[in-house]
Image: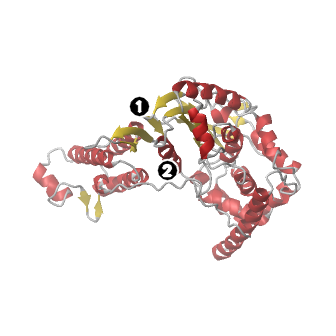
Amino acid sequence: MNTDELALALFRAERRVLEIQTKLHRWARDDPHRRFDDLFNLVADSSFLLVAWDRVRGNKGARTAGVDGQTAYYVEAEVGVEVFLDQLRAEVKDRSFHPLPTRERMIPKPGTTKRRRLGISAVRDRVVQASLKLVLEPIFEADFLPCSYGFRPKRRTHDAVAEVRHFTTRTYEWVVEGDIKACFDEISHSALLDRVRQRVGDKRVLALVKAFLKTGILGEDRVLRDTDAGTPQGSILSPLLSNVALSVLDEHIAHAPGGPGISRNERLKRRRHGLPNYRLVRYADDWCLLVSGTKDDAEHLREEIAVVLSTMGLRLSEEKTWITHIDEGLDFLGWHIQRRRKRGTDRRYVYTYPSAKALKAVTGTVKTRCRQNINLPLEALLRRLNPVLRGWTAHFRPGVSAIAFGYLRAFTWRQVIQWLRRKHPRITWKELRRRFCGNRWWPADGEVILFNPGAVRTTRYRYRGSKIPSPWPSTA
């Protein structure tokens, strides 16, 4: 199959997959108790496998091999995509497909000296996982509640941060900052599969999900270890399964007496009687419980949540689960959220800033790249720095970020100038400005100019609440 034929086949496959996903989502939404009994044929469908291959091939991890040593590029060059998918489809259909162990890779945990485990599956396993996700995601998306934002289509971190800001400006002043200890490593397989069975009645699909959970991990020491709990962090299916597991927390808060399910009059009545109201905002395993009440209410709710999570085999980290007031501020998903007095007035508002940890991370990246090879031309350095600066400022643009952008601008300028001074130790300031700044002060090399973070104008992210659209049309 040549490139044009593959592109046409992919276009048709994507249309077919979208149509089937739309039907699955509509059926699941219209009947909350429906169990789907014939999903296995969709997992092995050629259209689903082709779309799954395209997603695996387009992922950065396509360059990384699993335990079998094969990458997506190897499959394209040596095996052929059509042959590979035909063989994989035949194995899945006759149920001779068995996942290979996940290859372990320990990577640094940002902001700490600790390392976390990343699981790298074989390419064939990734394709089947992606196909499985294409089938299961529209079904479970019908059940997921609006308070959940992590690893869900058309949702992003900005939505979660905007919701925290929205409610903390409306009397929800106490915040339980939750941290689940080793969430991806400790999810109970039996409890997770019980929740999957509530929607999936096809035993072949359940067996496939269980097989991926029980694949085992080949450690960096080349020792094969069994996986009795948890989902491999880094696998394609893992985010969906973790959301299925953690939705037990969403549902508990949604149906609780002071949760979002009660009316405005009931909320006012509870506050008159000294009872708390609360809202949950969750992004994967990072969550905040916003409490309209007292600190004692927040502490009681923290203990209640610990009991709920224990049903999934999960524990709260006592050292990292804090109760803070919005006036003290909290760090959530890279943002610092705090209520402060507006300059020149007596009014107080909740503001969102880039957190100190996020600023330290980007300045660390800039510093590292400016400490590397000085034998390269300035253009090469600028091309390495610009995507980092442009991406970071675009992410933190919807907030009170002007001061942080100004600091990043000054820091980056200083690092680049120091790199030039190390490269040309005897150069004068006049010569440096003439050769590398166009007789000004801002570094440039020909048409490549250092991106200026200080020139980025900030904005306010529009809170979308429950109006976030579904990725699947309401009609098939």
User: Which residue carries the number 1 mark?
Assistant: 328
Q: Badge 2, how many Cα within 10 Å: few under 14, some, many 20+?
A: many
The percent position of residue 472, horizontal first and vertical second, equals: 67, 64
In the visual, does 343 lie left or right of 182? left
In the visual, does 123 lie left or right of 442? right
Query: Where the N terminus falls, by quadrant?
Result: bottom right
In the visual, does 416 lie left or right of 250? left
User: Which residue carries the number 2 mark?
Assistant: 158
Q: How is the image coloured?
A: secondary structure
Q: Which amino acid type is shown beneath numbered disc 2? A: His
Dividing the picture into quadrants, the one containing residue 302 is top right
Does residue 257 lie above or below 430 as drawn?
Answer: above
Q: Is residue 295 visible?
A: yes
Mark 2 vs mark 1: in front: 1
Q: Which amino acid type is shown beneath numbered disc 1? A: Glu
Dividing the picture into quadrants, the one containing residue 106 is top right
Q: Badge 1, how many Cα within 10 Å: few under 14, some, many 20+?
A: few
